[in-house]
Amino acid sequence: MRRRRKARKAGANFASYLFMLLTAFICAFPFLWLLMTSFKSGENVYSLSFFPENPTVQAYFDVFKLLNIGTMLKNSLIIAGTGVGLNILLAALCAYPLAKMDFYGKKLINNALLATMIIPAAAGLVVNYITIQNLHLQGNFWGVILPNSVNVFTIILLRQAYLSVPRELLESARIDGAKELRVWWSILLPQILPSVLTAVIMDFINKWNMFLWPLLILDVDQYPVATGLKHISNSFNYKFTNVAAGTVLAVIPVIVLFLLFQKEYINNTVGGVKG
Amino acid sequence: MKSSTKTHAAPTRGLQKLSKVKLRNTVTAWAFMAPAIIILLVFVFYPIVFSVPLAFTNYSVFAETKFVGMANFERLVKDPDFWVSLKNSCLFVIVVPILQVLSIALAVLLNKKLPGTPIFRVLAYLPVVTSMVAVSIIWKFIFDPNGILNGLLMSWGWIQEPIRFLSSSTLALPTMMAITIWQGLGYYMMIYLSALQHFPEELVEAAVLDGASGWKIFWKIRIPLLQPQIWLCSMVSTIAALGIFDVVFTITNGTGGPNKSTYVINFYSYLQAFNKFDFGYSAAIGIVLAVLTMVFSLVLNYYNKKAGEDFVD
């Protein structure tokens, strides 16, 4: 009886592994195939062999020389870097009273923040476009950075982190006569650095992947890498090995960040939906 | 929170004193929140509010803006492209149940904590963090008539000529649904997995002792306990499916082709605004989407409540 149950369990485990392996393969193979293709020579792009016959890094030279991927990566870094910095600063400020103060309008703000989470992002596209035109920010990095400079998800994440900081710590600083801004900066913020780091990573990946808004607002030579790749693969006479190499370069920073912080990243995305 | 409970218990004098503290707090609090709130007001709330009146105008870059009443909506009703978009957006909701069933199945498997599951967790999540542009480049290459998928199917002799996954008007939309499922699977799986890991395991253990089979435990214990997550994920993914845009835009290079067969509401709204510069009409289409999303949410909510009552019985 027991042996039969054991055998059945082994069988179930085997089936589980099979299903998992299949899914893992489907998830990972497209990335590996892209990587392998980027090392193939132009005439072999469509060959079915997994490993390139005559591996070459020509495509990587080409994307830097012909397609200016260096500039695109730099643009991405400027846009995502500035945007993340601004977001963390504004969100950290905004989350402080929400977590640690009792004030009039708290409920209103909390509900308004939650409401933004269910509004599809595309809803504001047209009106925001008109706003950016009126602010004369077309063709300016700020036209991309400003509308995305407050991520509600970051506010909620940091508020959650502040809540775990003991109240006594703040009270004693207040008795010492420290101003609220000082309390926030030198007492509260250092306590939640791990959450700040998580927020930075998540927001950076978000902003690095943005493509539509930059496409509407920026000029071609200002495109970040996601928009630029879209632009290149749209043109008629591109070489796919080059596009593949460009895509690998665009995806690698995200994958590396994700692998380094995967635990924090996944837990907080999942937690955010629940909260 | 604490001080407000105190307020209720305290006599009137104390209440006034507390309110004074609260009043002072309020000034400080709003000062801290002001920068973020201004940005959100301008770029999140104002667009939503303002797109309603916009839908009743002929706002465009070409003509003087005038109030046109219901004209945009009357035009919608007679616009065949709009009806195609509406139909396709509703069709896209098919991905919701598929996505939920697959991700629950995977989450249950991962919850067994077999060796190797951490690596699998990361692999399944990789598509979630990848940009839609990269995803579309990768899959277009794989689905290409000369690509690896057709190449393999042909070399195995399963098909005689390449399947036109993305260039046939019948297959393009289902192919995009498949890509959407591929990209979303890891996300929903992790939500279910985290819920499963916080389950009261005593319940399962007790059932095992009573001799319940794996299937019975799954259907009678795990699924009912997962109900809040199932509802939440269905809601989130329904809203996402109705508002689908990125995958259509990137895969079709902003054309919605072949032959308008992959037009969806959000895409059509985008097209009207940024190809035709007809912002008023675009806003009207956006309003239809908002109403549609609300209706779907209400229906889901209704069934969730009903299912909840059944479960309590």
Image (cartoon, rainbow, N blue to C red):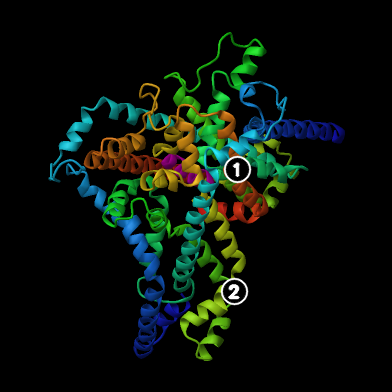
**Chief secondary structure of the magenta portion:** helix
Q: What segment carries the magenta color?
A: B228-240
Q: Hey, which quadrant is residue B150 in on the image?
A: top right
Q: Picture coordinates of residue B215 (x, y %)?
A: 67, 35
Q: Nearer the viewer, residue A30 or B100?
A: A30
CA separation in Å, label 1 and label 2: 34 Å
Horizontal relation, residue B288 to residue B9: left or right: left
Callout in the foreground (1, 2): 1
Q: The N terminus of chain A lies in which quarter of the figure?
A: top right
Residue B201 seen in render? yes
Q: Picture coordinates of residue A170 (x, y %)?
A: 54, 82
Residue A249: give its label.
1
From this view, report whether residue B74 is shown above or below residue B115: above
Secondary element at tag 1: helix
From this view, report whether residue A173 is shown above or below residue A115: below
**Chain letter of disc 2 in the image:** A
Q: Residue at x 28, y 42 (%)?
A: B287
Q: Nearer the viewer, residue A271 or B243?
A: B243
Circle 1: is it few (<14), some (14-19), or many (20+) Cα within 10 Å? some
Residue A190: give its label.
2
